[in-house]
Amino acid sequence: MAKVTYVQPDGTSRTCVNFEGMTLMQLAVGNLVDGIDALCGGMMQCATCHCYIADEWLDRVGSAPDDERTMLEAIDGVDIRPNSRLSCQVQLGEELDGLVVHIPAEQPGI
Ligand code: FES
């Protein structure tokens, strides 16, 4: 089980509970979290699942690997930061219980 808190740009937040090892994107979509649209369904083709990992969690989650970073850079309108991740590429597990992520103010193409 992993509890994840999604923080919106206005500071409001929702905490969702994952019981089955979903990705960070799947948990958000399944709970109708605003700002995670995931238009490609997790195929790393759209970047509409972009999020920012809270600084205190970045070591545990890890930075975006090269292919993910390349994808983020290829899409116009993505405000890429050192803690940027595609939420569809982050697998949730017990080690990420308590994770906090921030939703960007805008997603590409939305
Ligand atoms: Fe499209 Fe993650 S859902 S890149």
Image: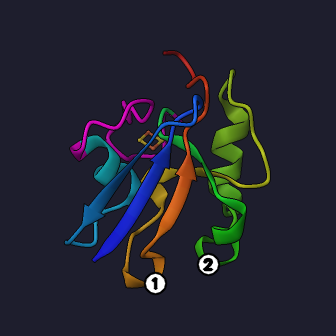
Residue at coordinates 20% horizontally, 71% vertically from top-left? Answer: 19
Which stretch is magenta? 30-47
Q: Quadrant of the N terminus?
A: bottom left
Q: Position of residue 84 (x, y in %)?
A: 67, 49
Q: Position of residue 101 (x, y in %)?
A: 55, 53
* Labels 1 & 2 near each other (Cβ < 8 A): yes
Horizontal relation, residue 18 to residue 70: left or right: left
Closest to the observer, 21 or 1: 1
Q: Position of residue 107 (x, y in %)?
A: 55, 25
Mark seen at residue 51? none
* Residue with the mark numbered 2: 60
Image quadrant of ligand 1? top left
Residue 51 among magenta residues: no
Residue 36 among magenta residues: yes
Residue at coordinates 59% horizontally, 71% vertically from top-left? Answer: 61
First along the sequence among labels 1 and 2 = 2
The residue under label 1 is which amino acid type?
A: Glu
Closest to the observer, 109 or 3: 3
Horizontal relation, residue 32 to residue 72: left or right: left
Q: Position of residue 76 (x, y in %)?
A: 69, 22
Mark seen at residue 95? 1
SS label for mark 2:
helix
Residue at coordinates 75% horizontally, 39% vertically from top-left? Answer: 80
Instruction: Reply above or below: 108 against 55.
Output: above
Residue at coordinates 36% horizontally, 67% vertically from top-left? Answer: 3
Q: Residue furthest bottom?
A: 95
The residue under label 2 is which amino acid type?
A: Arg
